[in-house]
Structure formats: C-alpha cells, structure tokens
Amino acid sequence: MELLNILSEGRSVPEDMVIQLILARLNSADVEHYGYVLSCLPFMSEEFLKIHEQLELIKSLKLTPDFIINIKCADKDLVHRLSGLKLHPETGQLYNRGQWMRVEEFNKKREDKDEEVEKEEEEEKELQKDIIGQMVWTPENLDGNAFARINMYKDTVLRPLEDYISGHNPVFLVELDGNNPPEELHSSVMSRLGSMSIKHVSIPVLLHQADDEESPEEIDTEDLLRSMSSSRAVAPGFRWRRSRWGRTCPVALREGQIISGKPELCVGFQDKMYFLSSQEAYQKFVRNPRPYLLPPMPRPPCRVSIIGPPKAGKSTLCKLLAQHYNASVLDVEVLVQPLLAKVEQERLDKVEEETKQIAMEKIRIKMEQDGEQNSVTGDHPEVQAMVQSALEEARHMRTSPVSLYAEVLEKRVKEIEEAETVFGWVLDNFPKDLSQMNAIQQAGLLPDILFCLRDSDGNQVLKRLYETNKNSVDNAVRKRLQDEQSMKEKQALNQKEPESEVEDEPAQLQTYLETVVEETTADPAVTEKKAVELPDHWDMGYPDSSEMNDYKLQLQQFVSEWGQMQYALTVVHSVLDIGDKSAEDLLQEMVLQMEKPFEHVCWELSAMDLDMEAEDIEAELERAEENSSDNDTAEEENEQGDSTFKRLLGDTHHFCPVALKNHNVLWPCTDEIAAKYREKTFYFSSIEARDSFLQNPVQFVAQTEPLKPPALRIFLLGTRGSGKTANGEWLARQLGIFHIQFREQLQTLIVAKTNKRVPYTGELDSSLGSPEDLEALIEEARGEVEEETKELEEDSSNMSEKEEVVLTDEEEAIKAYLSDGDPLTPQILDMVIAPYWKQEPYISTGFILEGFPHNPDEVQYMLGKQLFPDVVVTMAVDVTDVQRRLFPTFLESWQERRDHRDAQLGVLRDLRKKNREENIAKRRAELTKAENTKLRNHGEEEGDEDDEAASNGEDRIEDMLEEEFPLEEENEDFENEETKEEASERLEAEIAHRYVADENSVVTVTELLGELNIPTVSISASRKLSVVRHQLLRKIQPLLTNRESLFQSCQPISYSMAHQLLLSSYKLHSAFGCWDPINHYKDRDSFQPLQWPLKTTYPLIFHQYIYFFVSKENRNTFMLNPLKYLRQPKPTPSLPVKLAVVGPPKSGKTTVAQMFAEKYGLARLSIGSVVRMVLSKHEHTDLAVQMKKFLSQGSAVPDELAVQCLEVVLMCSVSTTQGYVLDGFPKTLKQSELIASRGIIPMLLFELELDTMEVLRRGLLDKMKPNKPHLTHDSSEILHFRNSCYKQEMEHVRPHFQEQYQNWIPLDGMKSKWWLWNRITKEVSISMKHVSNYLWRTRSGQAASIDRLCITPEELQCRLKEFAHYCPVCLALCCHLVDCSETAALTHAAEFRGNYFKMCGEDHLELFLTTPDHFVAPGCAHTLPQPHLLPKKITESQVKNRFPQQVEMRGFCPVTYLDGKQRYEALVRGKMEYAVEFRERIYIFETRQKQDKFLRIPEAYCNQKLPKKVPPLCEPVPLTSLPTLGYLEQGVAVSVIKALTAVGCLKPKYPFLSIQRSSLVYVAFYLKAFNNKSVEYTRKKYKKKLALFEEDCALIPYLSSTMRGNCRPPEERPIDFEFKLNRFLALGDSPAANSAL
C-alpha cells in the first residue's frame, strides 16, 4: 500500500525500498527453483548504499550469481543507441531508432490488393501514425546527458564492478558485444550455457488437458496411473513414470496430511507424475516443487500410538520413533495428571460438603429426638467421623473421566501442529481400553496407525517383570519354600522318623532348589534356622510359580482389552511380536510399516502393459516417418529407430533376479513370466520366483551400487577329437579362470582306488587277440612248470589282493558311466559338480567345465539344482577332421600292439624250437644208449656185423625221433592276422561311428540348453589351431572384459530426441557434459575438444543421463561396458582455448592454425579477417566508421583499431565457447602491448622458427604451384623483406612474452606439420590441465600451482606477501632462507588464500599444495626476518663502491672455515664475484655453492673470529710482466685455439677469395662473435655476419655439385638454383675484400 501511495503521488520509489523489494523477490520460493537474472544492481546512485556495499550485498545473497554476463559497447555506439530511443507516454514503452524509423518508412500499398486489405492496412497505418505522433524524446537520453551518464558509470561503478568480475570464476563469465542484436546475444548466451551442460529448469507440466474426459473420482489408482502416464508425453516411448507418492498429494504430505490427489491436477515433473489435491496445492507445487520432493520426503506424518503389556518396551520405542521422525512423545497419563488432581480435589470437596450437611442434619434430628437442643456444627465429632468415612470411601471409588483425556490430548496436539520444529506425535501406551479409544475417536484424535506390541508366549514380558521386581518375588518364593520346609520338618518330628529329610518340591522347582539342613535335633529353634537358596538362573527366566500370578493376570487383562479394541478399530493397526528382537529391529519394522504406502509398487506384467508398449512403438514409428523427410537426420533416425523400441529391462537384465540373489547364478528368462517394478520389466524363471519378488522387490534390486554378476562360467562341449581339451586349457589360461574336465574328475575318483583308468567300451581293440593267451603259450613253451606254478600262485595272490579292493555303489556307477555312458545319480553329481558353483575359489574366479552335461539327465539335474553357465561353447568339427586327428594315434597304438604280438610270436617260435632240440637231444641220448647196449649184447654173439648194425641203429634212431618230435605248424589264428590296410579301414569306421554317437549327444544337449535360453557359441574347430583360438578369444573374452556391465543396458537415440528430453528435464546431462567419455578415457592426459554444437554427435541414454559421442564406434564401445568408462575422473568445466601462432612467411602457421580450428572447433582469427568481419557485420558502429576513413584514404588500419576489432570478434559465440587461435598475430611489440591492455593474452604463443633459405625455398615452391586463386606478392625480394621485418620485430616481441607471461614456446618449423601438431597438442594439454586444476583447487579453498597462468612479474610481486621470494617450506622445516628470486619461472610457485608463494623445488611444492596451513601464518613455526636482516647478493662493483668498508674475516670464506672445523687449512680466500651483504657487513666466498649455503643459514657463519696467524696474502702477477710465450698462453691461447679448431672443421672457401684469405676472415669473424669482453650487441652482429659468411661459403660446393653434366632446362633444375646462382654472381660484382668484410 505504501508503494502504491508513493506511485500515485508521482514520487520516486526510495532506493532502500527498491532493494528490499529486490531482496524479497530473490528470497522467494519460485526464485529458489527457477533462478533469476539480476540486472538492476548495483545502482549508479549511492543514496542508500555505496557501490561496494551493493556488491557485498550481491556476494552475500543466499543464491549468489552463478554466471556474470558482461555486455560491452563503445561509448559512441551506446550514445547513438540511447539518443534514438523514443517514449510512448501512455504505455511507457520505449521504441528504438530502427522501430520508429521503420514505421515512418511504411511502404505504399500495392495496386493489386483487394479493397478490404487496403482498408485494413489504412487503419493499421493510421494507428501507427498516431503512435508515432505521440512518441516523445527523453531528456536523459540526449547526447550530452547520455555521455554524462556513461562517464558517471565509468567513474563510480565500472572499477568496483571490474574488481568483482575479476574475482568471479572466469569459466562462468560471459562477455558479449552490445552492438549485436538481442536475438544474437540470446543465442550466444544459450550456446555458452549449452556447451557447459547447464541443466534446464524443470517446469511442472499439467497433464490433464481441457478437452480430456473427466476421470471419475472413484477411479482405481492403477488405472489412473496408466491413463495419465501417456498424457502429454515428452516423446514417443517416454511415458511419465510413477513416483513413490503414488496418488498421494506431495504438498499435503509435506504439511502432515495424507490426501489423494485429483486426476485433473496431475502434473509431470522431470520424468515422474504427481497428483495434487487442490488448486492451492497445485500453485504451491508449481511455484517450487523442491521442498515437497527432496529427501526425507516422502515421509508419512507421524501420528502413531504404541500400546502393549507392561515392560514390553513401549516407552523406548516411542522415543526412538519420535527421534526418527523428529516428533514429540505424548504420555497422556503424565499430561492429564495435574488436571486429574484438580478434578479429584474438587470432587472430594464436594463430597465433604455434601456429607457434612447430611451428617449435621442426621445428628440434629437425632438430638431433637433425644430432646437435646444444642446446635450442631461441622466441628461436631460425629460429623467429623462421618465426613472422614465418606472421604475414605470416595477415595476408594476414584474414577478418571475419559473426556478429560481427550481434552488434554487435543490441546497438546494443537500445540504440536502449530510448532515448526516438531513434526508429529507418538502416543505412549494410549488408548489402553475401549472407552479411551472411543473418546479420542469422537474428538477426531485417532492416530494414523496403531502398533500393538505382543509377546506371543509371554516369556519376554514376564522375564522383564521378574527382573524389575526380582527382590520382592525372590523373597516371596523364599518365604513360601521356608514355610513349606518348616511344615514338613514338623510333620517329620511328630512322626519321629529316624532321618529328617525334606520332601521333594513340585516338579517345576525340584531341579533348582538345594536345601541346607543342619544335623537332626529335637530342638525346634534350630529347625527354624534352615535356609533356602534360590538358583542363579531360572530356565524360563523367571520362577513359574504362584508369585508370578499377579503379573500373568496383568497380561491376560491387556490381551482382553486389546481384543475389544481391535474389533472396534477403524484405523490401520499392526501387531508386532517382540520375541528376542532388539528395540532397533522393532523400530525398523515400524518404519517399514509406516512408509510402505510410499514405496514403489510392483505388479505382474499384464496385457495392458503390452498394449502400452505397442502404442509406444506405433507412435515412435509415426514420428520416425514424419522426420524421414529431413535429409540431415533421416538416416540417423532410421538407424536408431529400432533401438528405441527396446523394452526397459530390470537391474538384472533378462536374468532372473531371484535366482541371482538366492543361488548366485545367471538364469536367462523370457517375458512369459514377468513383472514390472519402477517402470522396469523383470523376467523370472518360475511363478514362485515372481511371487517372491512381488512380496519384497527391494532385496532383489540394486540399492546404492549396480548388481555384480557372478564369475564367468562356461560349458565346453564337443566330440572326441574336436580339440576341446587343448583349446579349453589355453582359453582358461588366457582368461585367468579354472579349466575342469568332468571325465577326468571322475577318472581321478576311480584311479585313486584302482590305480587304473577306465576306458570307453568301444576303444578296446580285440582284433589282434588276447596277449594273455600268447603269454600262456610262451610259459608253456618254456617248460618251467615249477616256476610257472609259483608265478601263478603269486598272480593268484595278487589277484586276490586286487579282488579285495571293493568299489562302492557310487564308484561302480562312475565306472559304468565312464565305460558305457550309464547316467550318474544326483548324489554323485552333487559331489562332483555342485562345488564349482558353491565353493571358493571357483565362485570368485570362474571356470570352464569341459564335457558336462553329456546327456539329457545331466541337463535335468542342472536345471533342478539351478547350476547354469553363462555360455555353452561347442567345438564343431567334421568326421573327416576327427578321423584325421585321431587315426594316427589309433593306428600307432595298433602298430605297437602288432609289433608286441610279433615279438611274442618270435619268442614262442624260438622257445618251441629250443625245446624240441633239447628234447630230441635227450631222446637221442636215451635211444643211443639203448641201441649201444643192444649192440654190445648182440656184438658178443655176432662180432663181424657190428659196423653194419651200428649204422642201421642210427638210422632207426633218426626215424624214431622224427616220429616222436614232428615239426609243428603255425597256428592258423596267428597266420590269418589283420593287415595294416584292413586295420586302417576298421579304425576309420570305428572313429566315424563314435563321432556320430558323440555328435548326436552334443546336439541333443545343445537343444535342451537352448530351450533354457542359455546362449550357445559354435566354434569351427576344423580350421587351423591359431584361427580356432582366435575365434574362441574373440567371442569369449568380451564376456569377461565387459563382465561388470552385464546387467547394464543403454539406449541410443537421435540428437533431436536427446535435445527434446534435455529441454523438458525428462533426462539430464551426464557428468561428462558435452565431452565424449571414450575419447576422455583413451587420452586422459591430452586436451579433449569440446563437442559443440551437438548436432553432429551420437547421443545415448544410460539410466537417467544422456551421453554424447563423436562417432558411432565410440557409442558402440561405450554400450559394451559403460561402467568401465564411468569410473574415470569426470572432466571439469574449463576456459576456452586461447592460442597464437606466429612465424616468418611460409613457416606453416596458417596450416597449423587451420588444423586446430578444424579439430577442436576453434575460431581461426587473423588480423585481416577480424577487420573484414567488423566491417561486414558491424558496419554502422563507430569502429567501422573510423576504419573506413583510413581505408578510403588508402591507409592501413592502425593497430589500435585492429586490436579493437579483435576484441569485438573475440566476443562471438565460438570464441567464448570453444576458444580461438590467432594466426600470425601479434607481429610487433606495440600490438603485444595493445592486446595486453585489453586483456587479450593467449595462454600459449607458438613461434615456428625457420631460416631465411627455407623461407625463400618454400616461396619458390608456392610460386610454381598452378591454379592459384588470385595473384599474390610472392617474389623472393618481398619474401626476403617480410622475413627481415619479422625477425627484426620478433627481437622485441619474443623477450616481451618470455619475461611478462612465460608463454612463448619456440618450435622447429622444419619439422612436419604432424610433429608440430603433436607438440602443440601436448603443450596445450599441459596448460589446460594446469588451468583446470588451478580453478578447481582455488574454488575449493586449496592451494594451487600457478604455473602456465601467464602471471606477470608485476602481479607476482604485488601478491608475494609475507615470504616474498623465499621458500616457506624450507623456512618451516629447516629454518633455511632459500631465495627463489633468481628463478623467473613459476614452475614451483603456488597460490593460497589470494597470495603467491615460491618454492625451491618440486618436492616442496607438493608439500605446500598438500598442507599449506603448516607453512603460512599462523601455522608456520618460523617467520621471515625483516628485510634489512636478510642476506642479499651484491656484485663486485657494489663491493668496490662500498670503499672504505672492508670485507669481513679479511676476505676469507666463512663457510669453508666453519665447515673445515675452523682449522688453519680451512682458511681459503673468497672471490669478489661471490659477495653477500648481511647486517651491513660484507662477506665473500670461495664458490657459488658456499655462497648459497651462507644465504640459507647466515646466522651459523656470520659471527666467526679468525686466529691470530692467517695465511699471507697472495700478490697478483701482472700479465704484462710475463714473457712472450707466457703472455700469449695466458692471454689469447684459449680463444685462438677455439677459432682455429672451428676453421679447421669448416675449411671455408669464400667466393672470389683465396683459401688463405677466407680462413683469416673466418677467424676474424669468429673472434669478434665470441669475445666475452664485447657488448651483447656487437657479439650478435658478428654472429650474424659469421652465419652469412658460412652460407656464402656453402654456395661453391652446392653449385659445383648441381652444375655437373649437361645443361638442364629450367623446370628440371632445383627450386633454389637460380636464387643461389644469382647470389654467387652478385658476390663477384663487388670487391672481394669489401664484400667479405
């Protein structure tokens, strides 16, 4: 109202009120969410606050400005703009010159227009003329007044404002050219904000449209959420997601009420939808949704009641729950106690008064009957007795009015609701009964939820009650037992039993009681002293006896009251069994119960969900068709269209989350059994798994980190001979996992017991017969019966021992499996297979399981036990390959057996032959003996016929031997043996047969595994081994490399879709912003170009964020393993790149600048291009007008105007966003100073060095190039002149940048452009890293290195505060004074708290950057002495100027003397060139090192005393007193030797001079060029002459080598031939001596 009064009176609004209005607006709720653009502060007027106070006010705002937009405009241009403004007095609107001049120059109406159109335009024209006629000039905008205001702004506001801007982060500073139109300024600002990935403001969108059908109020929540999810969707396929609030109004919930929202007030915010309950709630939410959505919301209102039996822990839980929700605990009994006492007192007073009146009346009547006439008063004894009796009776009849509880509770609840610091209340054990519950229900104070603590078996409560009343209960138990014991003893004494024993107690106490009985005596007094000891611990925790009946009755009473209340309850209630749970566990259950309505809902995937997906697909197809007409984006949209249709899968992708959680296996599933949770679709292996997920989905999904898949598990299958064992072992080594052969594991179990492997049944070769039969024949042939018998006995004993090895049923089954392929039992598979999924190290490492499963039974076992692999690899091979691989081995085995059998047959033949010969010899001997005996007997009778008879006897013996020992024929079985060809055919047939069986088994198993959705990879094993292994590694290694991202899924989208999603805040920019994560990962140390604009990028959605990539290959790489690339350090916003490239003509600076401009998107600026740009785009500005004056006169644009043009162009969008590279600028020292005065300082300035010869050579090359676009001044003379001018100017420019900014980097221009590119890129990357690190550390309050920041010596000196150039680390750690002033480089300098510090080395710099507080005040232990107490170096001339002051210590070196332990030998004289002044004393030192040592710790060396005897002073010998040879040796020998060495190496021959003359001239130039006594200018001059002399001497060998042979046409001659020939001839035109000297 006050403001309206001021305005109505025509007065100006006071500045204090304006500032209050501004602050109130800045602190409003909507500004907190939407932000602000502040353009009205600071005021030029300082009536209320000074300028610096206004700036401090801006700095102290709750929401300080993030960006500063500085719009620059020249004074004359601004005055011209202000002077053209006209004001409309009625509307107050200002019209600029362009607007009202455009109206005045309204075009005439056309002749072919209709009359109606002409009439309308006439009316519009009349209206515009009226407006023009009403416009007035404003006095303050006239030229004079405008200049005055501008000058006033510069005098009062500009300087403090510039200081404020300089303190702001330069990354968030935007400078604009005020001469640009507003549209272009807005575009520049939005481009800069977009390049920095600034998040758009999230605006709530009302989803219900006016033409939509009204949803009924009683609509089901699920149906409502489904219908609203597609209303006003951001893009096809991107529906609004459900929030944790569901249908509950977030505004009402924040205010402590649970109210369902209305469908017509449903809003979409970011990617979720919310329902508001009223128009007021909708306005609050739209104004600022943050307080209603940020954590801890959604939090239910805390209106809770906790009841339970005594000692159930109600009060403890109330306190914990109230602490969790910042609520207040209400103990109604305590609250109502004062009021109950007052009401009770009033009731007793009333009873007393009524009783007193009645008693007095009764006594009076009685006295009247007795005839007494005395008056009765309240003090009458009988009245007093009756009153006291009535009061006692009334006290025993005390009742608590239930309404009183409700009244007190209502009052306290109102107080809590009005308080701002307390959110809710918790009732402690109230209501206790049905009446109290009805009372608070009538008062509307029922809690939202009631928790009843229950002890199912009663033990916990009784145990706690016993612990609380332990002494009284124990005393009662002890007294009862003593009474019972005494009674029994008395009975025993009365019965005179010989032994007095206490009868057993009841069963429940028998094991716990011990009775200590004194010796039996007849004295009853002794009997009374018997004591009863109770046990230390009861089995149930309390004595289960009659003493606990009262407590049990309390429990029963509570259960009864709760039963009545539970039946009548109308609010949500929950019964919690306390059991052995802790208070924290019960609190967690309560919180879960209270917040369950605000958890994400999980439901089965229904037909409606599938219909919604189909709608999204159809809408996306329509959108793609609409966009297909755009030639630029059609291809991209079509390529990415299919990927948009992918269903958003859950946290375990297509694997069952329940199987992963419970069994740690990956069970691939389909959408046959599916559910949706948080808008994601989860697949399940069974209905039971889905039901388990629906009951508690939180335990199966990712919480704070992505779910981790189990280790890699691979099944390797293949036929025998497919190479699966060799390749499996190799692959396991490559992947670092285990290789397991299933068959070998089974063989190990059998071999450990039988020491013998079990072969396949079909692999036993019986074609060559049994070797045991041959062994038996050999033994038989040997005829060693006894030995054979012994061996048989031994064999039988061994066999018996072997037979004693009895196999178990499991081992027999394994043996049958190995030999015949019989299926194994589940118990055996549990023993062999299951540990690989259940035990370490297989769980964490992974494995390749070869040869399993082998049959369908094993697949069923795998399914039943849920032992799934990640992939099944099958080694596919042809039968011919198997035969080729196995046949040689099989044939070799057959050949070995054949050779062994042949050897056995040979032994058998030899043995038989030997046995026959032995038997024949033995039999011959017998027959010969018999024949001899017969002949002897016959010889006695017939002596003459002895010889004939002997001869006949021998023949007869031979005949008999042949009959008895005939020659044995070979066995037919041995003769009809299998040949090698027959064996080959048989073996190939057997291999083929086994291959068919194995292949059928593999196919069957693979089909069964395919039905389980397990992926199968088929590897062609028929190829070369290296090719097979390459295929294996290529297909399997990504499963391990990208393992961590197995469950992650990405969604490629088009740029237009990404822009739409970001604009609506449905998705957000990632932490990488506009940078490519892949490029950033590959080249972390290199400078990465900013991808801007993003139209040419390839975006992708991952979770809630959008990432941008420079190529499809990078995007596809990211999709394989996104987590790998997201773990890298995120890029930080950095300043635009600012470079400059200078060099002589033809040095390639333009090529390098263009390469940078194209690669990094920088603006390539030459001084000519910026001038042309200003003339074309800002032709009406004062700057353009001034330049046109010079150009129209044929003059060059002055440097001042050219630099102004550069400043204007540098404010364009590309330069401020990505940066610029100056091409060939600055060229002079004046230009360098001008750009520095306007703050244009390149972070790096590269000079491409090139000699004159190379410049001319490149000029000739360019001159010979055909098809030039235009004529250029490219003659050799012009190039030579330009090169000379460049070198002359660079002599001043180079030291300027080296000394002022240390950003000058010389490069060899002779190198290739790629070498230059790599070198420049490396330097730029280092500088950008330094800048980014500096900005980040300074903004976080840390110390930061200031290297490569282009800090001038003046700024450095200004900000070197307490330690000046001395190293603070050395001073703090060692108390050393280390002066770093001689080091101009800032490599080891740092900034902390706005001050600069210089360190002596890299290690000290790291220490300072880590803990700067330890080295600066007040944390530093040592401070720098005063300047006059610091040592400083002085020159020899300064020492001489101090005459007659003498050098301390008579000129001896103090450091050498002290370090030499002050011995006489350590007295060494110092040198005048190493002098130091300390405390007005002069010291000289032997060497520079000792001088530096003194400078570090001068206190240690300054106060020394010389001994009385010192070495004598050495008198110098004059050089002229030496003899001639000595004089030459000491004077000129070194210089002459160097000159002669140089001339000997070069061997110069100058054109048209003799060799002797050339050598003498060269020596003369050399001595002049390297004379240390000459001034720098003279040395440089003669060095140039020496270099030119060397170039001229090189002409003779060049021309002699080039002009050999026949004369060649000009096009075949070298490019620089003519130039060098002309130069050679020119040398001959002038006199030789003059030309040389």
Image (cartoon, rainbow, N blue to C red):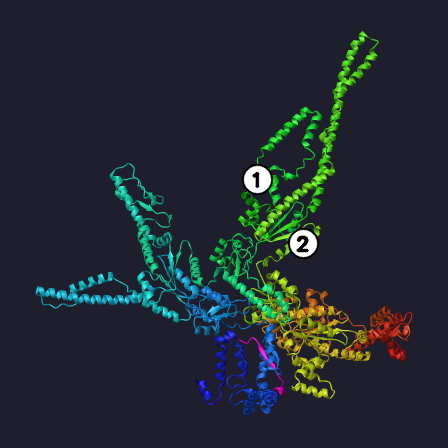
Farthest residue to the left: give it: 371
SS state under label 2: helix
The correct choice, above or below, for 340 with respect to 797 in the image is: below
Answer whether residue 1503 is visible to the viewer in this image: no
Q: Nearer the viewer, residue 1633 or 632?
A: 632
Answer whether residue 237 is visible to the viewer in this image: yes
The type of residue carrying mark 2 is: Gln
The correct choice, above or below, for 61 with respect to 946 in the image is: below
Residue picked out by circle 1: 813
Q: Nearer the viewer, residue 1081 or 1453?
A: 1081
Q: Using residue 39 as the reference point, say whether residue 377 is left or right of it.
A: left
Residue picked out by circle 2: 1031
User: Disc 2 or 1, which lies upstream in sequence?
Assistant: 1
SS state under label 1: helix
The correct choice, above or below, for 159 with respect to 221 in the image is: below
The correct choice, above or below, for 1350 with respect to 891 in the image is: below
Q: Nearer the viewer, residue 219 or 1277?
A: 219
The residue shown at (24%, 66%) is 347
Magenta highlight range: 62-79
The type of residue carrying mark 1 is: Ala
Image mark for residue 450: none
Q: Quadrant of the C terminus?
A: bottom right
Answer whether residue 733 is magenta in the image.
no
Position in image of residue 1208 (x %, y %):
65, 81
